[in-house]
Image: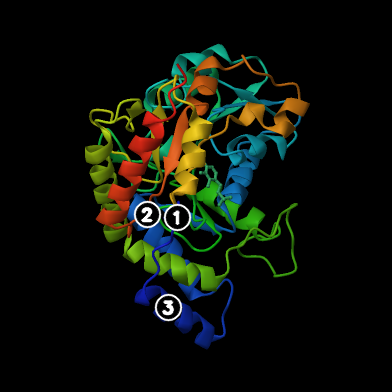
Amino acid sequence: MIPLARPDIGQREEELVLEVLRSGVLSLGPVGRRFEQAFATFVGTRHAAAVSSGTAGLHLAVRLAGVGPGDEVITSPFSFVASANCALYEGATPVFADIDPVTFNLDPAAVEAAITPRTRAIVAVHIFGLPCDIEAINAIAARHGLAVIEDAAEALGARRRGRLVGTHGNPAVFAFYPNKQMTTGEGGMVTTDDAALDAGVRSLSNQGRSDDGDWLEHDRLGFNYRLDDVSGAIGLAQVERLPELLAARAAVAGRYDAILADIEGVTIPAAVEGDERSWFVYVAELHSEVDRNAVMARLQERGVACKPYLPAIHLQPFYRERGHREGELPVCESVSARTLALPFFGKITTAQQETVAAELAAAVEASWRS
Ligand SMILES: *Cc1c(COP(=O)(O)O)cnc(C)c1O
């Protein structure tokens, strides 16, 4: 079976993990701090605070934006469920705005149309590592007095008009689950230039402690969203290797683009002039007359892992219970019914990619509805 994803862990990760284990300092130690500093340097922000997951980072960013019960938070329905759930954690309501059919990112006009007197924040997702139109979203937020939080979980190293994602003036949340561009096992990071916001993340992730107070002094209600130093050691090694990790993924994507572009019924991922995608997944779009379930069944049978990606958040069982239905977000629903994630990781071989391409071509050919 050619797997969907696989982390790239090397000798440097082993070295740093061993260093932490031998030091006896497994949490809140110097290696965790080095990881944060190296990450901030890479992204180009003044601060970076490590947390136990991307989801935890989103939760804290939403809380620190002052979102609470009765508020609405606008976000994309074409994302991982955490980018909407983070509003629910604070008693607020996620409001979905439809996406652009080419980039799969939030359509700024739909965002503006979704604003009500209760809107408090926008969670702007950079889906599949392609930057969203953050300038337009920031401008809308400024006009209406809203906070913006960037869900950059899939976009580490991506550039919007030359500028790295994370440096557009908003708190940005990154995630390090093993299928992401870099991993810590489980983990996440919140980046910002705002010292007060950074202190807020550090306090809330550490049981509401203040920086200078006593260990048993809790200034406010907090959580245990800390990242331990063993995970931090893996993260530090991965940040050191990021240029290599990202370049390997870009090369794999380039090879897929070349060998999949001419398959009838298959559209390769969009490129936006002037922007640089960071490659998180490789998602092909099938023609509406191709039966995606038949394609997936055949690929799986032939040893090629694949996944319908992404399912629309508002059509998840839990969101249907909250009243959401088909027809609400037509662009997202159309895209999400036709997109397919293919095996994608830095160390996939050219031969494996050629197998994927050949099997995909045959599966699509055999799956036209007509
Ligand atoms: C992975 C991901 C997250 C959540 O990250 P975890 O570390 O798994 O909690 C949030 N949003 C998006 C878009 C993601 O891809």
Q: Could you tell me residue 165's position as x and y percent?
A: 37, 41
Kindly identify the residue that appears in the image at 52 percent across and 18 percent down: 111
Residue occupied by mark 2: 345
- Distance between the Cα atoms at labels 3 and 1? 23 Å
Q: What's the distance in space between the residues labelled 3 and 2, CA to CA? A: 20 Å
In the picture, which quadrant includes the C terminus?
Answer: top left
Question: Looking at numbered disc 2 in the image, what kind of residue is underneath it?
Answer: Phe
Q: Residue at x 36, y 36 (%)?
A: 362
Query: Which structural element holds mark 2?
Result: loop
Contact check, label 1 and label 2, Cβ < 8 Å: yes
- Which disc, if any, is residue 3? 1
Q: Residue at coordinates 58% horizontally, 37% vertically from top-left?
A: 83
Residue 291 visible in the displayed image:
yes
Q: Quadrant of the N terminus?
A: bottom left
Per the model, the C-alpha gap separating discs 1 and 2 is 9 Å
> Which numbered disc covers residue 153?
none
Q: What residue sits right under mark 3 in the picture? A: 14
